[in-house]
Each structure stands twice: as structure tokens, then as C-alpha cells.
Amino acid sequence: MKRKVSVIGAGFVGTMTAQRIVEKNLADVVLLDIVEGLPQGKALDIMQSAPVEGFDRKITGSNDFAETEHSDIVVFTAGFPRTPGMNREELAMKNGGIVKSVVETVARHAPDCIIIMVTNPLDVMTHLAWKTSGFPAKRVMGMGGVLDSARYRAFLAEELNVSAKDIETMVLGSHGDTMVPVDTHTTLKGIPISRLIEKERLDAIIERTKNGGAEIVSLLKSGSAWHAPSSSVIAMVDAILGDSKRILPASAYLTGQYGIEDVHIGVPVKLGASGIEEIYETALSNEELKGLKRSADAVRETFEKLQI
């Protein structure tokens, strides 16, 4: 079956996402950006790697958002990146107008698509995209939980000197400082992580996870992460296009789950061909549940200040 994914934004995250999609032969890709020549040049460069990398999917670049027509998935990476010292509320004000405008256009040209939001602050922008598009909630989601969980697993694996593939965990809540690593469900091949790492050290790893993006921003001095974010998007794209029913943490619209409603926040979801097919309410400790609710409150407060 012919599949099509449109990637909005030809920056580092968008370009890497587009490259990974075609290299894995998941779908044809349209890479879009408002800068004339930028998406065309990057798409051409990626296309010329096909004989070497061995992929057959097509990639094109465009400045015309009408090219999103018939997209199965539209991935939003457009917007301003965080800069050192910038908080998420300031970032929301800068990116809110961009997301609203682009979503309005995409909703006209690709009314049946599934939206995956990557633009930060992720949960706020996901909620804005849902409100703007008028799409069913199951077709609008944010990527953050997959990325945050990957960072946490990477740091834990480094600490224990084991393969990250053998660590199971989920990071819930917002993609930001109020994220909630669920330690009660974090294990190394079934062994609770609390048996393997002292609490003080584990708290430090959790804190590093919460600041995972900011740490990279501070090191780069200009720009933000793109390798791990694009990998996280691909996990979601693959689950949707393959209808694999994978359980992944993603920013989803809650209607009372966990005692939270009318906000997008990171929770475990089942991803399939129709988007979010189910939201799971996993058992949380009292402290974890409080953290999740605080996280939801922070997202709601930031969204209300947007006034868009």
C-alpha cells in the first residue's frame, strides 16, 4: 500500500525524521518548509543516498503546504528551538502562532491524517493542534514520552553498564521539567531498578532525564537535540503505519483518566492504524500520581496563557 508522511520543518529534527522514514522504507515523504530551496535541497541530497543505502521510497521537498494532501501522517517539527535560559512558557508564545497557522492549512489539505507533534513545548502545542484542527483526539498526539523514556533508559544503562534494550520503563507527564519517570515500573529484566541503584543516585539520574534536552542545548550553544527526537518519532510512525498496536508513552488527550481531563499529557497508549486506539491507566504510587497531576496543571496553565 502506498504510504505518505509529510514532515513540516526542514531543520535538523525534520530532516533527520524524513531521512529515517525513507531509509527504513516506511513511506514516501514530503519535506516542507517556508524557506525557499531548503527542503528541496535537503530532499534531493537524501534521495541521492538511495542507491547506497538501498531504499526505494521517494522523498521530495516543497514550500507548498498543499503537498500534504493524502498524507497518512503529518509530523510537526517546525518552530523555534529552545535557547539557553529560555523557559517553556516563552517558547510557547513564540511557537503557538506558527503551529496554529500550519495546522489550519494541513487540516484543509489532509483532513484524514494523523498528527504527531514534535514542536516544543510539546504538550501545549499538541493541545493547540487538536483544538485548531478539529480532528478526533485519537488522531492528534505528541512524541515526548518516547523520547523521555529513551533518555532515561540510556542513562540507567550507562549507570549499570548493561544494554539499554534490557531496561523497561516509562516516563509520563509533560515533556519538560515536570515529567514523571515511573520508578515503580522500571526494571532491568524484571529486577526493580530500586534494588540496583541507590536512591540518591537514582534521583540524580531522574533529574538528568528531566533536563535531558536542556543539557544538550547548553552543550551545543546553538540549536537542540535531533538524533534521539527523530528516532522517537520513527517509533510512533512505524507503529501507526504498521498497525502494530505498540504500547508507547505519548501525549494524549485525557477525559478523566488518572483523574485528569481536557489536557494533553504523556500517558501509555496503544498505537495503531487509526492513531491512539486505547489509553491505559497503569498503577501509580501516590507520589507519581500527584506528579502526573502537577504536570497536567502546568500544561493547562501554559496553554491558557497563550490566548490564541
Image: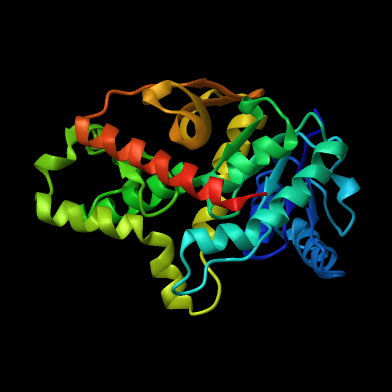
Q: Is residue 89 left or right of residue 131?
A: left
Residue at the extreme bottom: 221
Q: Is residue 227 left or right of residue 209?
A: right
Q: Nearer the viewer, residue 228 or 91?
A: 91
| Residue 192, picture quadrant | top left
Q: What residue lies at 32% left-to-right and 43% top-to-bottom? A: 180
**Displayed quadrant of residue 13:** bottom right
Residue 274, percent from left and from top: 66, 23
At 79% from the left and 61% from the top, the residue drawn is 33
Whether residue 101 can be seen here:
yes
State whether residue 171 is above or below residue 82: above
Across and down, in percent, residue 230 comes to: 57, 53
The structure residue drawn at horizontal position 53% and vertical position 60%, both measured from the top left corner, is 227
Is any part of residue 232 visible from this angle? no
**From what the image shows, is residue 86 above or below residue 126?**
below
Give how far across and how far down residue 61 sits, in percent.
84, 58
In the picture, residue 80 is in which quadrant? bottom right
Who is closer to the viewer here, 156 or 32? Answer: 32
> Taking 156 as reference, is 295 left or right?
right
Q: Nearer the viewer, residue 114 or 12?
A: 114
- The image shows residue 36 at horizontal and vertical percentages of 87, 69
Q: Is residue 154 left or right of residue 25?
A: left
